[in-house]
Image (cartoon, grey):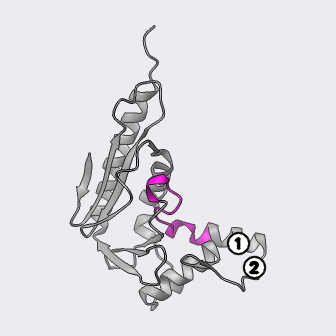
Amino acid sequence: MLFGAKSEFAIEAMIEPGLAPPSAVYGRMQVWCANTAVGDFTNPRCSLYPAYLGFTKLGTALPNLWLSELDGLSDEQLIDRIDRLLYGARGDQLLERDNRTALECEHDWEKYGIFNFLTNWGEQFDREGKSFIFSPPAQPVKVLIRPRATARVVSLHASAPAVTDAIGKFLRWFDESAAFLSRQSPT
């Protein structure tokens, strides 16, 4: 199933062939933004629930997915700042000087974690590096990706209505799939 348009923003997902009730929702998934795929759609039997949780949170946060302290930052500065605050890293490299306490790290995750996008959302995204999502005022939604083993930053954009629409359709599909798969087989 494709929810949205690959050229703008879409979530592509499927239930694993042969999956029978009762079961959790296992399948394949990738996200498209500006004709760029993120995720490994060939990876079988991935749990889609972590992505469902991520999209549920993102769907409610999207209209206000920005902080004024981020104004004026370049794409690289923006991804570096959020990566440092959430993961104490810059891409694959851990930062040597992170003197924050565990409580400070927890506070930073509460404040900045909503910008986390697809990272740790399921096996299908594990090989992608890190990605973050933002919705600056009066601008398109911005997805920043730093692929593994590279310093470059990929910047993708989509309209907020396209992102919101795709998320809503995916969440409805997931809920329907989960309801179907939770049924007990007749005995």
Percent across and percent down for residue 104 are 73, 74
The mark nearer the N terminus, 1 or 2, is: 2
Q: Which residues are magenta?
A: 110-125
Q: Is residue 170 depicted above or below 140 in this figure?
A: above
The picture quadrant where one finds residue 177 is top left
Determine which of the numbered discs, if any, sits on residue 33 in the image.
none
Asked whether 148 or 186 is in front, the reply is: 148
**Does the magenta-highlighted stretch encompass residue 118?**
yes
Asked whether 182 or 27 is in front, the reply is: 27
Q: Disc 1 marks which residue?
A: 105
SS for tag 1? helix
The picture quadrant where one finds residue 167 is bottom left
Disc 1 residue type (three-letter): Cys
Q: Is residue 180 depicted above or below 124 in this figure?
A: above
- Name, please, the residue furthest toward the top: 187
Q: Is residue 163 left or right of residue 58?
A: left
Q: Is residue 146 left or right of residue 95?
A: left
Q: Disc 2 marks which residue?
A: 100
Asked whether 64 or 92 is in front, the reply is: 92
Q: Which residue: 42% across, 11% down?
A: 186
Q: CA distance from mark 1 to mark 2?
A: 6 Å
Percent across and percent down for residue 174 are 39, 41
Q: Total marks drawn? A: 2
Q: Which residue: 30% across, 74% down?
A: 157
- Rate crowding at label 1 as few (under 14), some (14 to 19) or many (20 or more) other CA atoms within 10 Å: some
Quarter of the image with the N terminus in it = top left
Q: Which residue: 39% across, 30% down?
A: 19
Percent across and percent down for residue 22 are 47, 24
Disc 2 residue type (three-letter): Arg
Circles 1 and 2 in contact, beta carbons < 8 Å: yes
